[in-house]
Amino acid sequence: TQSTRPQRMLAAVHNNATRGDPRSVVKAIDQFCRQKEWAMNIGDEKGCILDSVVSEVNPAMVLELGTYCGYSTVRIASQLPPHAKIITLEFNPQNAAVARQIIAWAGLGEKIKLIEGSSGDWIPKLKEQFGVDTFDLVFLDHWKDRYLPDTKLMEECGLLRKGSILLADNVICPGTPEYLEYIRNSPRYKSQYFKSHLEYTRVEDGLEKSIFLG
Ligand SMILES: O=C(NCCCCCn1ccc2cnccc21)c1cc(-c2ccc(F)cc2)cc(O)c1O
Ligand SMILES: [Mg+2]
């Protein structure tokens, strides 16, 4: 039976990356996406911006919305301080299955809790189910029309604290106009745009970094 693109990406990781070496996993995926098949990982250019935000925030608790194959999950987790954790949400079970194996190959399973389901269902349950207090960093990379409702939901559920950082992918391409409008005009956030390119292309895209002011 025909393999899927995430399964072919996993094969590339198994064949080209060193088990237990997150940087080699990231490199193998980027090479696969540049040389073989485009895929919607954040990629190496925007990935460097993500890395700099993670190292600046040095978060103890991270929420990622949109695991896909685990590329950004691995990038973030490989920079977390000891005992820090990332909860990552993936809607598509097939993608989640691939992500679990890529995360395991990188040797980062201890730091990462992958949940299968939708943000709307799970955000209200994170405190009771996982004993989460607040998130220091939230990376938004799921359905682009869910960025705004889910940000409001996180506020309502008390998952953000004064100083929590939201980092949103794809605010230009595919684009998240309602989210940008809200977050850039809300007195409760201070936002900054990091201009970049859509992964593995020359098309403009960027990341929006926003600090929750409480
Ligand atoms: O669609 C994108 N990502 C979302 C994929 C689906 C997420 C589903 N999902 C996961 C967790 C979760 C939790 N709750 C609800 C739903 C949830 C995306 C697309 C492009 C892109 C594609 C084509 C093109 F021509 C240009 C750009 C580039 C990106 O970087 C992207 O991230
Ligand atoms: Mg994205």
Image: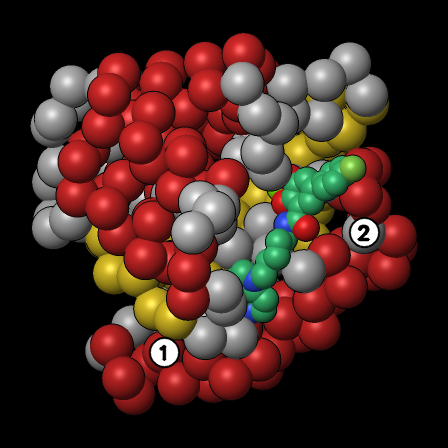
Q: Residue at x 23, y 28 (%)?
A: 14
- Quarter occupied by residue 12: top left
The amino acid type found where label 1 is placed reads Leu
Report whether 109 appears left or right of 179: left
What colouring method underlies this structural image?
A: secondary structure
Q: Nearer the viewer, residue 77 or 8?
A: 8
Which residue bears the numbered disc 1? Answer: 126
Which residue bears the numbered disc 2? Answer: 176
The amino acid type found where label 2 is placed reads Thr
Screen quadrant of the C terminus: bottom right
Lower position in the chain sequence, tag 2 or tag 1 = 1
Q: Is residue 116 above or below residue 162?
A: below
Judged from the image, the secondary structure of the residue bearing numbered disc 2 is loop
Q: Residue at x 34, y 68 (%)?
A: 115
Question: How packed is label 1: few (under 14 Cα within 10 Å), some, or many (20 or more)?
Answer: some
Report whether 48 appears left or right of 212: left
Q: Residue at x 23, y 46 (%)?
A: 101
Q: Position of residue 126 (x, y in %)?
A: 36, 78
Report whether 74 appears left or right of 202: left
The Cα atoms of the two marked residues, 2 and 1, are separated by 25 Å
Q: Position of residue 112 (x, y in %)?
A: 23, 53
Q: Is residue 64 above or below residue 22?
A: below
